[in-house]
Amino acid sequence: MAAGKGTRMKSQKPKVLHRLGGRALAQHVIDTAARVSARSVVVITGHGAEMVEAGLTPPEGVGLQFVRQMPQLGTGHAVQQAVPVLADDGITLVLSGDVPLTEAATLQALIDRCAGQALTLLTLDMPDPTGYGRIVRQGDAVQAIVEQKDATPAQRAITEIYSGIMAVPTRLLRGWLARLDNRNAQQEYYLTDVVKFAVADGCVVQAHRIGDAAQVAGVNSPLQLAELERVHQRRLAEALMTEGVRMADPARFDVRGSLVCGQDVDIDVNCIFEGCVRLGDGVRIGANCVIANCTIEAGAVIHPFTHIDGETLGVSVGAGALIGPFARLRPGAQLGAEVHIGNFVEVKNSTMAKGAKANHLAYLGDATLGERVNFGAGSITANYDGANKHRTVIEADVHIGSNCVLIAPVKIGAGGTVGGGSAITKSTDPGALSVARGRQVSIDNYQRPTKKTAG
């Protein structure tokens, strides 16, 4: 269910599109459904329907369908909109698009208990159940779910709440939905009323009770979103540390995508990983780094305050490379083994072979560097002529002096040297020394201009 407006979010964006861990809230729910082998996922949209439908993607191998609830007349009315696309031979798992942290194992247990025969509810004991529907039992059997606004004082004292998640045989759900009415305080069609119909029909109604409140916590405000973000990140951190990753402080760590780590990885504080990131054995990540869509091979060290973002092209950092601090690697940067990138160096769409170095204040764009190239401080490849990009090729063992401009397209031959301060516009031969700068002029006894005093 993803039709609600989310007024308390105070946002023009539909609530279910707000992000947690780099993904929309509803995308978390869809992806979890895929992990319990759902044949299809049906998303019920309403407020901001076009935006929601455009903002969600189907998991691999799972069909994704959208139905619209216009107007929004309650949870029962929402599920009624999905009835035409539900197959009678299956189990319908009802999930909420703003409850992102339910675990696949929990849903699988719910489905297993349903077994195509029983109406099974996911419930939780809460010290303060305010706002939630209460589970009314007779002995161990569930008799009804009573919404907060319709509950008696005795029912409001019940601490077992309905999470909003249920598993129900579709063939039975279809008939129960047809019997819903809106004779209640909210004048809405409550999905929870199917419980009383199931009881009346002699269907087994059971509850699968869990103790982890975060799994059923919904997001209704920016504060709740931030609280669940920290829960999510702590769980990711704990999972990684269980596999041997060392973290200076798991409370200061964020993954907004996927992070795969080898053995003996060390991550300092305030690091953010986005998109798809892979860290090889023995990689060390310094404090305050942002790393997105990148593969970092074994033994590489990423010094503090480095920003790596591969976007769609990706970035690769070779084994034993040293990057940063304050370095920036942009899409298409492909760095070989033992490459050194120092402070305030930017690399974009460039390949650097084993042992190449750019240690200070440099820009490499659309360039190919051979092995052991030394690219001097303050030097750049001028790759853009105002209309098109051009490539610079620097062959093996070249030394580029400080403050040079290599104006592409140009090739510097193997073993060559470019003198500091040169602007190179033509390709050079292997082994050549190339200097392209104005001749120095010195004037003896030069007198600087002086300011005139007011008369």
Image: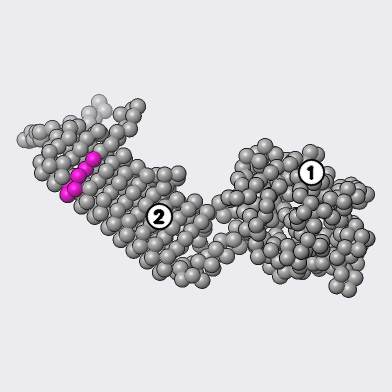
Q: Are marks 2 and 1 in contact (CB under 8 Å)?
A: no
Give the amino acid type for the residue marked by disc 2 in the picture. Thr
The local secondary structure at tag 1 comes to helix
Q: Is residue 234 left or right of residue 75?
A: left
Instruction: Report crowding for label 2: few under 14, some 14 to 19, many 20 or more residues within 10 A (C-alpha).
Output: many
Q: Residue furthest front?
A: 89
Instruction: Report crowding for label 1: few under 14, some 14 to 19, many 20 or more residues within 10 A (C-alpha).
Output: few
Q: Quadrant of the C terminus?
A: top left
211 or 88, which is in the foreground? Answer: 88
What is the number of the mark on residue 440? none
Q: Residue furthest left?
A: 444
What is the number of the mark on residue 295? 2
What is the number of the mark on residue 84? 1
The local secondary structure at tag 2 comes to strand
| Residue 64 seen anywhere in this rendered image of the structure | yes
Q: Which residues are magenta?
A: 393-398
Mark 2 vs mark 1, foreground winner is 1
Q: Residue at x 34, y 29 (%)?
A: 388
x, y percent for residue 350? 31, 44
x, y percent for residue 356? 24, 52
Earlier residue among tags 2 and 1: 1
Q: Residue at x 29, y 57 (%)?
A: 337
Q: Is residue 299 above or below residue 452?
A: below
In the rendered image, residue 435 lying in the magenta stretch gets the answer no
Dominant SS of magenta comes to loop
